[in-house]
Image (cartoon, helix red, strand yellow):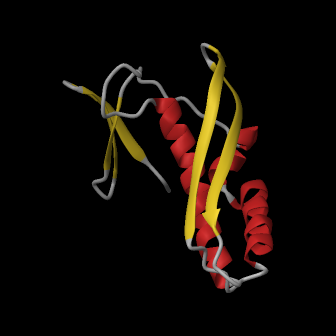
Amino acid sequence: MASVHVERTEDGYLARNGRGAEVAMGGGDEQGVFTPVELLLAALGGCNIVTVEPLTAQRGHRLVRLAMTVSGEKTAPTKLGPITITYDVELPEGDEKAGEVFRAVARRVEENHCTVSNALRGQTEIILELPG
């Protein structure tokens, strides 16, 4: 089971996983912290990229550079519009198939294998448990 603990601190908000990693959060005005929406975009990008990279390499096409920008804009105060994932890759010289393999893997990962993508498509129920 995946789990994070989120709490208010004197400096803002903090998310911590069971392995001790921490991410500072805020409402958007603070320097050096992520907003919750930025963390959502980072989770989507991270889910995709950590799956695309090894699958492309396993097929014999190690990309020289693999990066992405994930962007989305609020369409209303509590609604996020379409999210765009824009890859930035450098293909290995002389590897004629690398681009084709990368594009096929990236499509399959986003459509079928990324847990975060699937959750954002409304396939995950959210259960709210409140005290008392």
- Left or right of residue 123, residue 46 in this image: left
Above-or-below relation of 67 to 124: below
Residue drawn at (44%, 29%) of the image: 35
Nearest to the observer: residue 126 or residue 21: 21
Direction left: furthest residue? 10
The part of the image, by quadrant, that contains residue 64 is bottom right
Considering only vertical position in the picture, is 9 above or below 54? above
Q: Residue at x 78, y 63 (%)?
A: 108
Q: In this image, 55 relative to 28: left or right? A: right
x and y percent of residue 25 in the render? Answer: 36, 32
Q: Where 108 falls versus 5 (above or below)? A: below
**Looking at the figure, which quarter contains the C terminus?**
top left
Callout count: 0
- Residue 120, image x, y percentages: 68, 40
Residue 26, located in which quarter of the rendered image?
A: top left
Q: Position of residue 52 (x, y in %)?
A: 64, 67
Residue 12: horizontal and vertical position, in percent? Answer: 28, 25
Judge left or right: residue 58 versus residue 9: right
Q: Nearer the viewer, residue 14 or 131?
A: 14
